[in-house]
Amino acid sequence: MDPKQMRPATLAAQAGGVIDMQSGGIVPPIQPSTTYARDRDYAQINPDNMYLRYHNDAVRQAESVLAGLEGGSAALLFPSGMAAIAALFRSVPNRGRVVVQSGIYWGTTLWIRSFCERREIVLCEVDASDGAALAEACAAAPAHLVFVETPSNPWMKSVDIAAAAQAAHGAGALLAVDSTAATPILSQPLSLGADIVMHSATKAINGHTAVLGGVLVARETTPVWEMILEDRGAAGAVMGPFEAWLLLRGMRTRPQRVKAMSANAMAVARFLDDHPAVETVLYPGLSGHPCHALAARQMSGGFGFLMSIVVRGGREAALRVAGRLDLFHRATSLGGVESLVEHRPTLEPQSGLPEGMLRLSVGIEDQRDLIADLAQALGQ
Ligand code: PLP
């Protein structure tokens, strides 16, 4: 079957349908060579491969699975999510203008602020979950790039992607969506009008907490995309073959993992929502969440594995709860098969998060065990 016709679970499980024709292996091999030979007439033995900074089969295979899952025409892997974001922003000219969602992953915010200052790029930060505010920021002046993250980390706000695309295009800008917390299984921003979708592949795309990676997927290959492609090869922000191979392997079970994690997260969110020690649960799957209706329209198959809660009693109470958890590992990051808890205000003290906030990344463990762990940690 042509991989283009495969449904997501099939495409992922078969790693894009690649079979190693030399050995017959149904799992693609890893080719770690940094360079590729030429024949006696000086022609490349494999015309697709010349040097590892540009060419590797496992990288291309993983990219083609990711492009297929997002419904894009091309994908580019990077050695981290931040390297993917940096590659995207490097396509903005000096003294250009960008509109960026506020309250997103703190590492992204900090890097974009510093990059824009160095390159004299006008940076407009706006709460993009407020459609009118985003439209106003886009209408204020022409822009090159609008960058949003939905659901956002750690506030769990949703952005209306179709409306954001309209606002961005009206300003002459591309819309890029960081869809890390949604994954291509629950949301396809390109089909809603986004031009580029970005993921930290470190998270649920790989899902096993053992690969650092990032990806950009383009709806169509525009001159900006060609610039990003050329810059990646020339500047060398490439993913190595071992990581690409691990990513391909991790992706085989991604639809099942993401659905199981989302179902667990929904059960955990409902439990926490009813708990007297918890002041607020931020999870778009809960009907009381301000973005629930939008998330229900924009996502399918679940609301993801990420949520934030505010524990009554502030910082000390939240750290006490985190310290009592047995199953949730106290660690940063998200999207792995094992559940994690993080006191985000410790990591980003300048960003104004409530001191009682804990971020949970819910894994694929039995949800009864996760809920029992939270119940004992919260003191019930
Ligand atoms: N985007 C989001 C939403 C993230 O949560 C992260 C990391 O936590 C990143 C981007 C950066 O990805 P990486 O750590 O792979 O560089």
Image: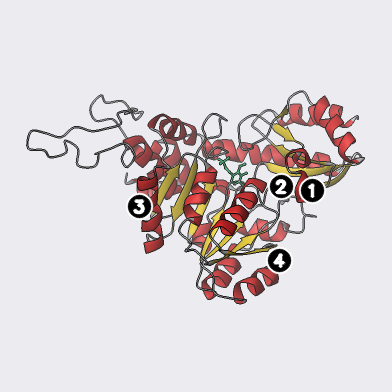
Q: Secondary structure at mark 3?
A: helix
- Which residue lies under the disc numbered 3? 230
Identify which amino acid the numbered label 1 is placed on.
Leu
Q: Nearer the viewer, mark 4 or mark 3?
A: 3
CA–CA distance between discs 2 and 4? 17 Å
Image vertical order of residue 360 relative to residue 216, above or below: above
Residue 371: % across, % down: 78, 31
Name the spot of residue 143 as percent of width and height, x first.
Answer: 54, 70
**The label number, if any, that marks residue 271 in the structure image:** none
- Residue type at mark 3: give it: Glu
Spatial separation of the CA atoms under disc 4 and disc 1 = 19 Å
Looking at the rendering, in which quadrant would you find the C terminus? top right
Label 4: how many residues lie within 10 Å, few (<14), some (14-19) or many (20+)?
A: some
Give the CA distance from mark 2 to mark 1: 9 Å
Dot 1 alpha-carbon crowd within 10 angstroms: few under 14, some 14 to 19, many 20 or more: some
Q: Residue at x 48, y 57 (%)?
A: 196
| Mark 2 close to ligand 1, CB under 8 Å | no
Q: How many C-alpha atoms fall within 10 Å of the one at disc 2: few (<14), some, or many (≥20)?
A: many
Horizontal and vertical percent for residue 363? 65, 33
Gap in angstroms between the C-alphas marked 1 and 3? 39 Å
Disc number placed over residue 353 in the picture, else none: 1
Q: Are marks 2 and 1 in contact (CB under 8 Å)?
A: yes
For image coordinates 67% across by 52% down, the residue present is 104
Question: Is 188 above or below relative to 223?
Answer: above
Q: CA distance from mark 4 to mark 3?
A: 35 Å
- Ranked by sequence position, the earlier of labels 1 and 3 is 3
Give whichever of discs 4 and 3 has the lower sequence position.
4
The residue where tag 4 is placed is 130
Query: What type is the residue that disc 2 sits on?
Result: Pro
Does the residue at mark 2 contact the one at mark 4 (Cβ under 8 Å)? no
Residue that mark 2 sits on: 154
